[in-house]
Image: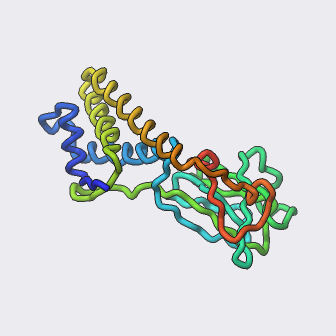
Amino acid sequence: MPVFTVSQIINRAAAAADMHDEFVSFEQWLAWLNVERANLQMFIVRHGMPMQNLQVETLLQPDRVALQQDAVALVGVWETRGGRFRQIQIRDFPGNFFQNTGGPSTGPAQFVTVEDANTASTSQMFLRFFPRDPVGTYIAVYAQAPPVLTALTDAMSFPMGMEELMVLKMAKKALVKEESDTEAIDKLITQQEKFIEEFVAARVLTNSGAVKNTDGLERDSWVFEPLYPEVNRWIFF
């Protein structure tokens, strides 16, 4: 897979925007690059081809558990016991708010939700389980955000020229900052988005020949390995 340095991406974005001076500082280019890199990964995964690393977190006796700070999506949650796994249904917050933290209902969890607890005094998100399980062991699987790039020599990789969308969107931000016309680059962005959508769609169709077994979720059954849900079941943050 092609590898690109921060310097190469910034130079391509500057060329696309026809920036010949230091009108855009390195710090600004780098900030845009980190934003657009994350946006590109999310664009690809939302169209059905996740490439991020998956991280597993063990949760003991869960009730209300803080989310991983660097995660971009919750892939799934399972109770684990004796080498077997039972997938927990993910619900929206109002549909899972049966009791407050430490409430009276206990037992193996049936539902889990992502709770946004951002207030004036805290900026945190949680997993809330119902019922709370005072004895069980669970795992939560997350898709990780890309690491923050900080230096010209830092590197990243994308397949099939997909990084061009990131380059073009950085160039557009530079043109907006300069108060220049963005019509031409908007057309290029649209073309690149269509290219990625077509590539991912072809990949998804190639992988769609089998019927996916969802008994582990729909029938609340135990299996000997986690059945990872399709992207449309992920919860994005």
Is residue 27 in sight in this rendering? yes
Residue ID at (78%, 45%): 95
Position of residue 128 in the picture relative to residue 145 (left or right): right
Is residue 120 in sight in this rendering? no
Residue ID at (33%, 35%): 169
Position of residue 195 in the picture relative to residue 132 (left or right): left
Residue 164 point in image, percent of width and height: 30, 40
Residue 204 lies, with reference to residue 57, above or below; the image says above
Position of residue 201 in the picture relative to residue 119 (left or right): left
Outermost residue on the front side: it is 209
Outermost residue on the left side: it is 20
Q: Quadrant of residue 227?
A: bottom right
Residue ID at (31%, 44%): 161
Q: Quadrant of residue 61?
A: bottom right
Position of residue 156 in the picture relative to residue 135 (left or right): left
The scheme the figure's colours follow is: rainbow
Instruction: Name the foreground residue: 184 vs 51.
Output: 51
Residue ID at (20%, 50%): 7
Instruction: Name the foreground residue: 14 vs 100.
Output: 14
Residue 91 point in image, percent of width and height: 73, 48
Query: How many marks on residues?
Result: 0
Image quarter where the N terminus lies is bottom left
Residue 33 point in image, percent of width and height: 32, 45
Outermost residue on the right side: it is 104
Residue 168 lies, with reference to residue 154, above or below; the image says above
Residue 105 point in image, percent of width and height: 86, 62
Residue 46 lies, with reference to residue 81, above or below; the image says above
